[in-house]
Amino acid sequence: MQAFNPAVFSLPAVGTLGNPSRNLIRGPGPDNWDISLMKALPIWERVHLQFRVEMYNAFNHTQFSSVSATAQFNPAGVQTNALFGQYTAAANPRIMQWAVRLQF
């Protein structure tokens, strides 16, 4: 999956740094939902049983964390980095945790 079009980049003229801005490449924003559900059931006067479900990244949206942003050119000016513009890492997928808690 491409984060941007690598074909729009070219080798700058000899002796120059090129003209892109400092923050030219910016990844997608986070889309992360953490959800927690709890239910407490009374057993006796001071004793409760609590059921809990916790979900991190509950809707399992992919959270890309790294993009290959290094363009490498050969002497002819052709870009040779095959990963240039591609996502290279992602954060954890959905994590669920279930718990039962006895309070007294």
Image: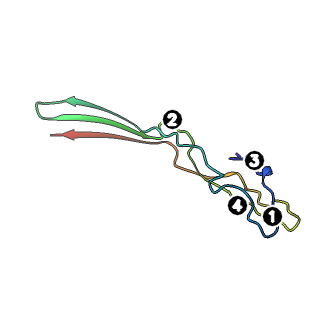
Q: Is residue 12 above or below residue 39?
A: below
Q: Earlier in the sequence, mark 4 or mark 2?
A: 2
Query: Circle 2 sits on which residue?
Result: 59
**Helix, strand or loop at disc 3?**
loop
Mark nearest the camera among 3 and 2 is: 3
Q: Compute the Cα span from label 3 to label 2.
A: 28 Å
Query: Circle 3 sits on which residue?
Result: 5
Q: Compute the Cα span from label 4 to label 1.
A: 10 Å
Query: Circle 1 sits on which residue?
Result: 73
Dot label at residue 70: 4
Residue 20 lies in what quarter of the image?
A: bottom right
Q: Is residue 78 above or below residue 102?
A: below
Residue at 17 percent across and 30 percent down: it is 43
Three-letter amino acid code at the position of disc 3: Asn
Drawn side of residue 60 relative to residue 8, left or right? left
Q: Position of residue 17 (x, y in %)?
A: 73, 65
Q: Earlier in the sequence, mark 1 or mark 2?
A: 2
Mark nearest the camera among 1 and 2 is: 1
Q: Position of residue 19 (x, y in %)?
A: 73, 57
Q: Compute the Cα span from label 1 to label 2.
A: 40 Å
Dot label at residue 4: none
Q: Earlier in the sequence, mark 3 or mark 1?
A: 3
